[in-house]
Amino acid sequence: MGNVNRINLILHAHLPYVRHLEYPRFLEEDWLFESLNESYIPMLSLLDRLDEEGLNFRITFCFSPTLLTMLSDKELNERFASYMKLHIELGRKEEQRLKGDKETQRLAIMYLSSLEKNWHFYEKNGMSIIPVLKRLKENGKIELMTTAATHAYLPLYREYPTAINAQVSLGISTFRDIFGYNPDGFWLPECGYYPGLDQVLSKYGIKYCQLPSHAVISSRDKSRYGGYQMVELPSGVMGFVRDWAITSLIWNSVSGYPCDVDYREFYRDIGYDLPLDYIRPYIHEPDVRVFTGYKYYRITGKTDMKESYDPERAQEKIKLHVDNYLYHIERKGIMLSSFGIDNPLFNLCYDAELFGHRWFEGISFIEQLLRKTSESSNIRLVSPEQCIRDSSLDSEKLYINGCSWGRGGYSDTWLDGSNVWIYRHIHQAIERMEELTERFPDQGSLKGRFLNQASREVLLAMSSDWPYIMHDNTSVTYAEKRLRNHLGSFNVVYSSMCKNTVNTEWLIKAEKRNAIFPNIDYNIFRPENKDE
């Protein structure tokens, strides 16, 4: 067999923990519902179908603990059911409204059909996608990995080992509670790595993680393979270095495939285009316009003047882009071979929500990619687990410096003028949480629950989503409110415990509000070997 280009495709699914049952509907809960309907369900439905066809493929998925918790939440499932029924109702209404415009009507019917199929698939699998993940895992078609408990950007907490341990251990235990076994892989949130983090992962039995392309560029050691073979970190944990150039063929927000003029325009939606009197039942009160998923235009260009979306034209473009994607991989494989790097490993890491949600045609791209690679003799889909088990594959030992996949390769995105203020408050909360564990060790009953809730609030405050949203200047008000609420809730516990009291009424409400990590033990924040 000649040179084989191996593709390690990792899709990372993550959303912050958003659950506001105190409201009939809540705007930010749509993040979950849109991702389920447009990304997770159609993606897993596709893989389930390809598995039934007997197609040979392998993809690695990471579903974050916060997302898995929401996917397992009965109340959120009921709200998702209401969301789907509402949007199916809108589709039938659109089908009638567009009777005089057959071209646009067929798009409305397409969306309606997709909603109905997604809902049927969801119902068939017990109102959950988790059984599908388990089935695909058992059938050897996907590999599953975990990530930090609340997707904290870990390099900014390296001075707080208790917090790092809490994030890693709870990420693993949440995965184990849902899937029944310990994961081998750990997705580093935002590809954020610092020297010594791999030692923590190794302590908890993690065998591999992904790394940003910047890891090899800034490595203390000269790399022989440039990230196109596995990297062995000092602890023995294996690192899979993301290929920036190939990933950017899709990921680049200016020149990536999803920017093509023939693909569907994400931002033109009837939730913003149609009169309020018509669309009001399907948006949020009071008259807050939102995306409905009914979009009838293609990207066309950079102006507001858009042309009608043509699904057939878009599908033809998908075929061209898949061919182009594989061509770039093959061409790069030839180039690497000339440098003595045979059978290169292309680690391609993406946010799962890109496919289907942001890039409507992305699910079709994945399907065509899987079909093409299954027929290829020199391109093979692999998983990290397979690579580690294959003793014939090469690896190299490298000392990796601090890095991420953020702009500039370091921590700028999560630590800039828009969000730097949050860390003095979170760091103080961590220190006070450590203090509570020492002053009140191994508490049971109400005090134990009270302290457990304090640890939940600290972990939720650590989420990387809040500083990212502030940096990106999107839902800043919500991000700041969440952060202040979590820190404020922690302070309720701290001030009460300083008086050796428990606010029982507040505790019951707080546990219902943030029903995450039910088996948490606040003692995970106890400093280890402090006296040494």
Image (cartoon, helix red, strand yellow):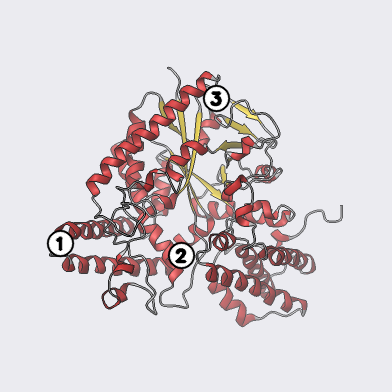
Q: Residues within 10 Å of mark 3 (few under 14, many from 20)?
A: some
Q: Earlier in the sequence, mark 3 or mark 2?
A: 2
**Left or right: 186, with 235 as reference point:** left
Secondary structure at numbered mark 2:
loop
Q: Which residue is mark 3?
A: 393
Q: Earlier in the sequence, mark 1 or mark 2?
A: 2
> How far apart are the alpha carbons under marks 3 and 1?
58 Å
Q: Quadrant of residue 137?
A: top left
Task: Find numbered disc 3 in the image and state the secondary structure of the residue it sits on.
Answer: loop
Under mark 2, the amino acid is Asp
**Callout 3 amino acid:** Leu
Q: Which residue is mark 2?
A: 73
Residue at the extreme top of the image, as rendered: 1
Q: Which mark is residue 101?
A: 1
Indicate the position of residue 61 as horizontal and vertical percent values.
47, 46
| Residue 156 at x, y percent in the picture | 68, 54
Q: In the drawing, does residue 248 fall left or right of residue 80?
A: right
**Which part of the image, by quadrant, shows the N terminus?**
top left
Q: CA distance from mark 3 to mark 2?
A: 42 Å
Picture residue at 61% right of the left edge, 82% below the top = 505
